[in-house]
Image (tube, rainbow, N blue to C red):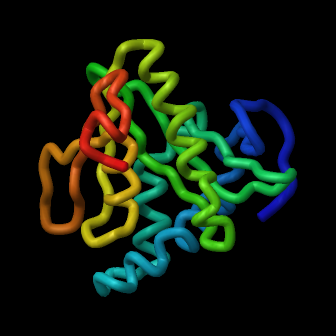
Amino acid sequence: MTQASNSTPSGHVTFAVVSAADFEELAALRIAAMKASLEAVGRFDPERARERLRKSFYPDHTAFIVVDGQRIGFYTFRPADEGFQLDHLYVHPSCQSRGIGSEVIRHLLSLADASQMPVSLNALRDSASNRFYQRHGFVQTAEDEWDIYYTRTPGVSGAQAGGA
């Protein structure tokens, strides 16, 4: 985790611009954040995790998540089809369970709501992230061998979707 500067949403979380040169730092954050979930399903492979990130790396739509001047995660949130796609949202394990992910997702959903656009994403089966996204109003739309696919309609809160 390294120093960062720049922009702001709300609360104690800020965001910092990402460039193509940040790829390895982002990959390390992704691997750290996903390691336990991937190990639980017998699919932890750091090189595969790095390559999957490379295939969906959009620096112009990616931002570091910064807390107290430290880059502790990142997200990729981009326009896609008839809405937005949340390709990545990772918080380093040492910073999880502090409400940071919820603060980030609320910020991103407010952007989508302002445009009246849905948000789509996929999450690894058997990952705690599934409960997280359901709590924030995402509804399952499909699934395959490894992932569950979700969409959140504009303006739907977790309580309206049946979440907590």
* Figure quadrant of the N terminus: bottom right
Depth order, front residue of 40/156 = 156
Residue 55, given in percent of the width and then of the height, sits at: 41, 51
Image height of 73 relative to 95, above or below: above
Residue at image coords 58%, 39% = 62
Question: In the picture provided, is 10 more to the left or to the right than 68?
Answer: left
Image height of 143 relative to 146, above or below: above
Residue 71, given in percent of the width and then of the height, sits at: 75, 55
Question: In the picture provided, is 3 more to the left or to the right than 32?
Answer: right
Residue 109, given in percent of the width and then of the height, sits at: 46, 30
Image height of 100 relative to 153, above or below: below
**Residue at the top extreme, as displayed:** 115
Residue at image coords 86%, 51% = 69
Residue 27, given in percent of the width and then of the height, sits at: 58, 63
* Quarter of the rendering containing residue 44: bottom left
Question: In the picture provided, is 33 more to the left or to the right than 81?
Answer: right
How many numbered discs, if any? 0
Depth order, front residue of 113/43 = 113
Residue at image coords 65%, 45% = 20
Image height of 149 relative to 81, above or below: below
Residue at image coords 47%, 50% = 88
Depth order, front residue of 162/32 = 162
